[in-house]
Image: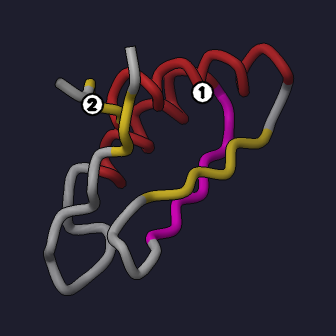
């Protein structure tokens, strides 16, 4: 099944969409540190750092929350 990135919302200020609260929750749950950036095409890039197990779990949760299935 192919996946595509969920596009960033169109608010003028970064952090006003669902991205930041969701990542804060993932950081609390996993202990990993997550940094987010958006590009001109409104896609998101995640930098996940921390202990290996925390990074793997955070990555899994990010994929669940921020990827949408292409139909």
Locate residue 23: give its quadrant: top left
Locate residue 57: give its quadrant: top right
Q: Is residue 34 one of those drawn in magenta?
A: yes
User: What is the spatial separation of the Cα atoms under label 2 and label 1, in whole angstroms?
Assistant: 15 Å
Horizontal and vertical percent for residue 17? 20, 60
Horizontal and vertical percent for residue 8? 27, 61
Left or right: 47, with 53 as reference point: left
Name the residue that disc number 1 marks.
Answer: 59
Tell how many labels: 2
Horizontal and vertical percent for residue 22? 33, 40
Label whose residue precedes the other's in the sequence (2 or 1): 1
Q: Residues within 10 Å of mark 1 (few under 14, many from 20)?
A: many
Residue contact between numbered discs 2 and 1, judged by CB atoms under 8 Å: no
Name the residue that disc number 2 marks.
Answer: 68
Image position of 5 with respect to 51: above or below = below
Left or right: 15, with 12 as reference point: right
What secondary structure is marked by label 2? Answer: strand
């Amino acid at each position: 099944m192919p996946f595509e990135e969920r596009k960033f919302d169109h608010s003028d200020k970064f952090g006003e969409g669902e991205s930041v609260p969701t990542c804060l929750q993932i950081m609390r749950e996993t202990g990993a540190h997550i940094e987010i950036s958006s590009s001109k095409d409104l896609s998101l890039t995640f930098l996940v750092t921390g202990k290996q197990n925390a990074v793997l779990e955070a990555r899994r949760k990010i994929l669940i929350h921020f990827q949408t299935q292409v139909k």
